[in-house]
Amino acid sequence: MKAIVKTAVAVIIAVCFAVSGGLCIAGGQPAPGKTLILYYSKTGNTRAACEALQKETGADIREIKDLNSRQGFGAATGMLKIFMGMQTDIEPASVDFAPYDRLIISTPIWAAQFGLAMRTFIERNSFAGKDVIIFITSDSFIEEKYQQKHKDLVAASKGRVAGYFQVQAADLVDGKKVPRTKEKIVEDALKFLPEIKACTGAKK
Ligand SMILES: Cc1cc2nc3c(=O)[nH]c(=O)nc-3n(C[C@H](O)[C@H](O)[C@H](O)COP(=O)(O)O)c2cc1C
């Protein structure tokens, strides 16, 4: 009987996170070990969320930078490169993943895809043997069919997708996009902490 109640509670919690925009996919208990948060951010939303998650989980954190300016005209060329499946120049080109058991890969969404610098990083690196938790920020809710494409991209680089979380960075008010504050984005990101910790095995 106890086992049935436990299972029911676990299912309800999982469904709640799925509906609210986050889901830890990995089954069973995550092995203890180190987590690296790897993020790209153009306007600071993803950075703010990742820095807050870093403080709460004690994970290491690295930023992937786009070496080409993405301001003004650069944003348009970035979008063009996304559409054409092209890459950009990034720094660092790779990271030593040896000390880590899992990665949190975090990026804004551009044209329903990962931001150009992060997509470039993923395409050029292998995540073999690593659990990968995807954490995105975007102005609108990213539907399942696009989530699947993001998971497929990570899987193509041999990462084992262990979770997918999304935080919305804008609201639609009277048909107009209104950006959310960084404080609200951080607040929403931290709501996923219990589930992210369940994915990462973080004790903190
Ligand atoms: C070039 C570009 C394309 C974008 N495309 C999308 C999109 O397709 N869907 C969406 O929901 N948000 C889109 N956004 C909004 C960003 O994903 C969102 O504002 C994100 O939180 C920005 O994160 P950052 O501040 O870390 O760069 C786009 C933003 C930029 C700059």
Image (spheres, rainbow, N blue to C red):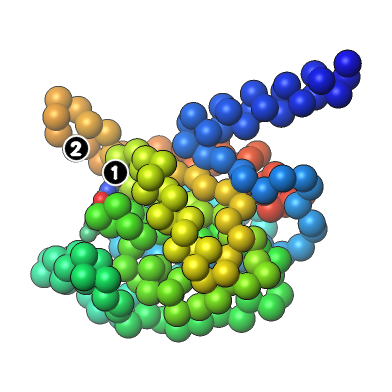
From the image, tell me which residue sits under label 2: 177
Please name the amino acid that badge 2 sits on. Lys
Q: Give the x, y percent position of residue 26.
A: 67, 48
Q: Give the x, y percent position of residue 30.
A: 75, 52
Question: Mark 1 vs ligand 1: CB under 8 Å?
Answer: yes
Left or right: 183, with 52 as reference point: left
Nearer to us in this view, 121 or 156: 156
Residue pictured at 77% horizontal, 45% vertical? 28
Residue pictured at 22% horizontal, 37% vertical? 178
From the image, tell me which residue sits under label 1: 139
| Circle number at residue 105 | none
Please name the amino acid that badge 1 sits on. Asp
Nearer to us in this view, 52 or 165: 165
Q: Give the x, y percent position of residue 16.
A: 56, 27
Nearer to us in this view, 79 or 187: 79
Question: Does the rendering let one see residue 190?
Answer: yes
Examine the image and state in which quarter residue 82 appears: bottom left
Question: Does the rendering let one see residue 92?
Answer: no
Mark 1 neighbour class, 10 Å CA radius: few under 14, some 14 to 19, many 20 or more:
some
Q: Quadrant of the N terminus?
A: top right
Left or right: 22, with 14 as reference point: left
Between disc 2 and disc 1, whose residue precedes? 1
Dot 1 falls on a residue whose secondary structure is loop
Q: Residue furthest top?
A: 1
Picture mark count: 2
